[in-house]
Amino acid sequence: MSRGDDAGEIVGINWGSSNFRAYRIAADGSVIDDYAAPAGVAALDRSGMAAQVDMLVARWPDHGPIYASGMIGSNIGWTEIPYAEAPAGLRELAGAATPAEIGSATVRIVPGIACRRAFDGAPDIMRGEEIELLGLAGGDGLVALPGTHTKWARLEGGRILDFFTSMSGEIFDRLTAQGLLASIVEGEAVDGAAFLDGVAAGRAGGLGLGTLLFGARARVIRGDLLRADAASYIRGLLIGSEIADALALNPGLASSSVPLVGNPALCRLYASALGSIGVSTRVVDSRDACLTGFRALHEARAA
């Protein structure tokens, strides 16, 4: 038994397609050390993944049990781990965490969650976000995880019932980096009048999102929208359209309070957008949610 294991320490890795983030977590849930690198599984072969784990073991030679969530358990990762089926919580995920020998260490890979949504019967999937959701310590109601692929999940008694995913973050990144809309964008998306105008237009649902997005270019060309405000307006359109989906699928949203888990700057945009329709929010840093989620997963496995 290593010193870390004897002290109740664990290691939690959030290993996505693009990034590798690892936390050495104390028995009380606090972080002892952390490490991040642009070393996602999409850019690594098996020897590269093994080298990444070996590097971490060299950094923390007296580590405790290692858990990894995210795309490391997908068909482009180390090995494909079957999803846990929703409704699912800590017990199901802890029971399905699968040990794998990666490099010189045993890593328990968290399975992710699949659901078939109650409101339309359609499937959805997540890998990695389940750790953040379960880090909310017994939450109930709707939770949003703003990001490249934003998740809106329904929780009950700390278990994930179902969820839907919006690609609005990826759409924004791609549209403002290249193509026709990139030619009208100057600067970053920020909260303010242009952003909230976009939110209102996206939420109204009178026109399809494709039409609204081209309309952003027309607004700039015709002088109705400043080029400096274009990114904010486009981001608002996308988030507003996403909120329209959330309202349609969760009618009680308008009278609820929604935790926002993720990057604080992006969460603040979602908070402003939701606040414009009277929905209260609180921002939870994704790092804090990960620490709590990994710790809770380990304790559920040990129970």
Image (cartoon, helix red, strand yellow):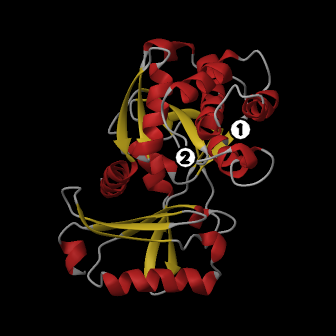
In-front residue for pair 257/64: 257
Q: Between 200 and 291, which is closer to the camera in this rendering? A: 200
Binning the other alpha carbons within 10 Å of mark 2 as few (below 14), some (14 to 19) or many (20 upward) gives few
Q: Which mark is residue 123?
A: 1
| SS label for mark 1 | strand
| Position of 88 relative to 245 (above/below) | below
- Determine the image quadrant of residue 138: top left
Answer with mark 1 or mark 2, whichever residue precedes in sequence.
Answer: 1
Most distant residue in the front direction: 223
Residue at 80% x, 51% y is: 179
Report the front residue among 173 and 121. Answer: 173
User: Considering only vertical position in the picture, is 181 above or below 6?
Assistant: above
| Residue 218 x, y percent position in the rendering | 79, 31
Residue 112 appears left or right of 25: right
Q: Nearer the viewer, residue 288 or 159?
A: 288
Q: Looking at numbered disc 2 in the image, what kind of residue is underneath it?
A: Glu
In the displayed structure image, the side of residue 107 where residue 4 appears, left or right: left
The x, y position of residue 181, in whole percent, is 75, 44
The quadrant of the rendering that contains the N terminus is: bottom left
Q: Position of residue 260 (x, y in %)?
A: 43, 36
Question: x and y percent of residue 213 in the render?
Answer: 75, 33
- Element on which disc 2 rests: loop
- Mark 1 and mark 2: Cα distance apart in space: 34 Å
Say few, some or many: other residues with alpha carbon within 10 Å of mark 1 (under 14 / 14 to 19 / 20 or more).
few
Residue at the disc numbered 2 = 188
Identity, as a three-letter code, of the amino acid under mark 1: Pro
Q: Nearer the viewer, mark 1 or mark 2?
A: 2
Q: Is residue 118 visible?
A: no
- In the rendered view, does 83 fall on the left or right side of 291? right
